[in-house]
Amino acid sequence: MTFANYPSLADRAVLVTGGASGIGADIVRAFAAQGAKVAFLDILDEAGAALVQELKGASHQPLYLHCDLMDIAALKAAVKEAAARLGSIAVLVNNAANDDRHKIDEVTVEYWDSSQNINLRPQFFAAQAVHPYMKELGHGAIINFSSIAWKGGADGMVSYATAKSAVIGLTKALARGFGKDNIRVNAIEPGAVITERQKRLWFPDPKQIDAVVARQPLQKVLLGEEIARTVLFLAADDSRMITKQTFTVDAGLS
């Protein structure tokens, strides 16, 4: 198959949170292949270094910055460093998340706060931090990550599902607030993307993956590459009149 190339993304500074593994790493790869200047934030130093090495042949080798997104001061500092090294941030991809499972009766205040502090809070503060750069540029694209988890009543991950539903409200509010500066804000709701983490933690038996695929109208395994291609479209000028929208990429599962 041949997929789209977006000339508007060449040399554009892009920031991806949680970019060292899984869907995030596929997003970093996709932007690097488009000739973008990509910085990505994570706490997985070994995986981050490996991804930088993997992409050393790109026109702009990606920049990895260690950052605990639960530390908002560190997040703001990382955004500032990325902009200083790559130029004003034109694209933000709020990808980082943690979809741990838990029983409702076992959720503590500490667990709840921790979950919101990785799945929701950094998306707002990252957007706030990149806003001045995008305003200076005269354009920008922010892509927030929600999930289909909130739609069906995911009682085994209620804190995560709550945060991901809130991302939709956040996206609409930011789209309205940033629109006057020609900054677009959209959200993506991935479905059952089969990453290495998902296979290790939630789908250790291949038959479990087969069961999920069987529930999809499009009966193919959903990979991070498919999500990354949607991100590219929403980041590129091709989608310049699309904002305040949510795009579900789940092979029809939800």
Image (cartoon, rainbow, N blue to C red):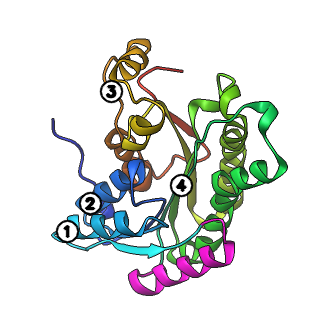
Amino acid at dot 2: Pro
Q: Name the residue under label 1.
A: 58
- Counting residues from the N terminus, which is met first, the one under dot 4 or under dot 3? 4
Spatial distance from mark 4 to mark 2, Cα to Cα? 26 Å
The answer to whether marks 2 and 1 mark residues whose Cβ atoms lie closer than 8 Å is: no
Residue 239 drawn at (x, y percent) = 43, 48
- Counting residues from the N terminus, which is met first, the one under dot 1 or under dot 3? 1
Amino acid at dot 4: Ala
Amino acid at dot 1: Ala
**Residue at 38% in and 23% down:** 209
Kind of element beneath mark 1: loop
Spatial distance from mark 3 to mark 2, Cα to Cα? 29 Å
Question: Dividing the picture into quarters, in which one does residue 68 lie?
Answer: bottom right
Q: Mark 2 points at which residue?
A: 7
Q: Name the residue under label 4.
A: 96
Up/down of 21 relative to 46, above or below: above
Spatial distance from mark 2 to mark 1, Cα to Cα? 15 Å
- Counting residues from the N terminus, which is met first, the one under dot 3 or under dot 2? 2
Residue mark closest to the camera, 3 vs 2: 3
Q: Main secondary structure of the magenta part?
A: helix
In depth, the one of 228 and 44 nearer the eye is 44
Number of numbered discs on residues: 4
Residue 238 in view, yes or no: no
Query: Quadrant of the image for the N terminus?
Result: top left
Question: Dividing the picture into quarters, in which one does residue 123 lie?
Answer: bottom right
Spatial distance from mark 1 to mark 3, Cα to Cα? 28 Å
Mark seen at residue 221: 3
Query: What residue span does the magenta drawing correspond to?
Result: 69-87
- Counting residues from the N terminus, which is met first, the one under dot 4 or under dot 2? 2
